[in-house]
Image (tube, grey):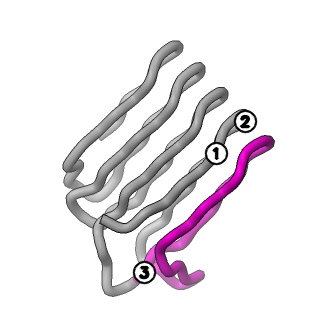
């Protein structure tokens, strides 16, 4: 799945496949994964929330936020087979299990 917007939120539920890309210039990003996959989510202004499906091999995590907390409620590993690449310039980042 791939989605982008200049203004407004991006929301995706029960996303399958191997990769999801979401980019928002002015709005939040909320993704709920049905399968373990790579995720690239970027917001210039707004929070990012990703609810991930379980994976036996784990997730690698790359995050950046200029303002706002980062809360990760899943185990991560530098050798994980799936990458979560999440960044926002103005907002929080939250990663929760499904």
Q: Which residues are magenta?
A: 58-80
Select label 2 or label 1 by which is in front. 1
Q: CA gap, disc 2 to disc 1?
A: 9 Å
Regarding mark 3 in the picture, which secondary structure is present there? Answer: loop
Q: Looking at the rendered structure, which numbered label has been put on residue 92? A: 1
Q: Is residue 84 left or right of residue 53?
A: right
Residue 65: give x, y in percent of width and height: 73, 46
Residue 49: give x, y in percent of width and height: 47, 47
Residue 44: give x, y in percent of width and height: 66, 29
Quadrant of the rendering where the N terminus is positioned: top left
Residue at (53, 24) in percent of width and height = 27
Task: Give the residue at mark 3.
Answer: 58
Packing grade of label 2 (10 A; few <14, some 14-19, many >=20) is: some
Packing grade of label 1 (10 A; few <14, some 14-19, many >=20) is: many
Q: CA gap, disc 3 to disc 1?
A: 22 Å
Regarding mark 1 in the picture, which secondary structure is present there? Answer: loop
Regarding mark 2 in the picture, which secondary structure is present there? Answer: loop
Task: Give the residue at mark 2.
Answer: 89
In the picture shown, does residue 3 fall above or below 70?
A: above
Was residue 69 drawn as part of the magenta stretch in this picture? yes
In the picture shown, does residue 81 fall above or below 46?
A: below
Residue 73: give x, y in percent of width and height: 50, 70
For the residue pair 24 and 49, the one nearer the viewer reads as 49
For the residue pair 69 and 25, the one nearer the viewer reads as 69
Residue at (30, 74) in percent of width and height = 54
Question: Is disc 3 in contact with disc 2, using a CB cutoff of under 8 Å?
Answer: no
Residue at (28, 58) in percent of width and height = 18
Q: Tell which circle, 3 or 1, labels the residue nearer the N-terminal end.
A: 3
Question: Is disc 3 in contact with disc 1, using a CB cutoff of under 8 Å?
Answer: no
Q: Is residue 85 left or right of residue 68?
A: left
Q: CA gap, disc 3 to disc 2?
A: 26 Å
């Amino acid at each position: 799945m791939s989605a982008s917007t200049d203004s407004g939120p991006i929301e995706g539920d029960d996303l399958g496949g191997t990769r999801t890309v979401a980019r928002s210039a002015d709005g939040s990003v909320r993704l709920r994964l049905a399968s373990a996959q790579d995720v690239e989510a970027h917001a210039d202004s707004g929070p990012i929330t990703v609810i991930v499906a379980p994976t036996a091999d784990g997730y690698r995590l790359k995050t950046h936020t200029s303002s706002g907390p980062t809360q990760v409620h899943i185990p991560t590993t530098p050798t994980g087979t799936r990458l979560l690449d999440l960044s926002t310039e103005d907002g929080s980042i939250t990663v929760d299990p499904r």
